[in-house]
Amino acid sequence: MEKYNGWTNYETWRVNLELFDGYELEETITSIFDFQEYIKEFAYEAITSYGEIPEDSLAVSYASAFINAVNWYEIAESIVDSNDKFICEDCDGVFDKKDLHHYKYEPEIELCESCHDDRMEE
Ligand SMILES: [Zn+2]
């Protein structure tokens, strides 16, 4: 599939740029999937101007169609990365990069301490 400026598609690129560029991660995130849902909710709130525009309006309906094409995981991952955090491959938790553990000699396998210890015990 063709990418747009390095992102999955135009919708993902634009939503990231306009709503999440420079996002500072202050929340404690236990799972990347929860965070993905969180930013999706945030975007839906934004397109109704936080409840100002009725959800059944044509404008919101068109905007929903636009943001439904967004790759939320890609944006969530990018926010995590630009905030010096990483996603543990085993538990999907989000941790500080200083606590990153690689599995044996495989730098592409990024794990939190507890998942790393679990794998070493196997
Ligand atoms: Zn983990």
Image (cartoon, rainbow, N blue to C red):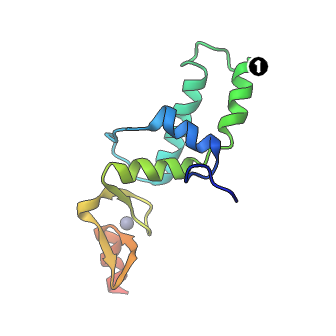
Vertical position of residue 53 compared to residue 119: above or below: above
Q: Is residue 119 left or right of residue 73?
A: left
Vertical position of residue 78 compared to residue 27: above or below: below
The x and y percentages for residue 42 are 51, 32
The quarter of the picture showing ligand 1: bottom left
At label 1, the amino acid type is Leu
Q: Is residue 94 left or right of residue 32?
A: left
Q: Give the quarter of the image for residue 100.
A: bottom left
Number of numbered labels in the structure image: 1
Mark 1: few, some, or many residues within 10 Å (few <14, many ≥20)?
few
**Mark 1, residue position:** 58
Residue extending farthest to the top is 52
Residue 110 seen anywhere in this rendered image of the structure: yes
Residue 56 seen anywhere in this rendered image of the structure: no
Q: Residue at x 64, y 43 (%)?
A: 10
SS at badge 1: helix
Residue extending farthest to the right is 58
Q: Is residue 16 left or right of residue 71?
A: left
**Can you say which quadrant of the picture contains the C terminus?**
bottom left
The x and y percentages for residue 102 are 32, 76
Residue extending farthest to the left is 98
**Can you say which quadrant of the picture contains the N terminus?**
bottom right
Q: Does any atom of ligand 1 lie closer than 8 Å to the CB of label 1?
A: no
The x and y percentages for residue 51 are 58, 16
* Closer to us: 5 or 55: 5
* Closer to us: 81 or 117: 81
* Closer to us: 35 or 62: 62
Q: Residue at x 64, y 48 (%)?
A: 9
Q: Residue at x 49, y 39 (%)?
A: 38
Q: Residue at x 39, y 51 (%)?
A: 80
Vertical position of residue 47 compared to residue 52: above or below: below
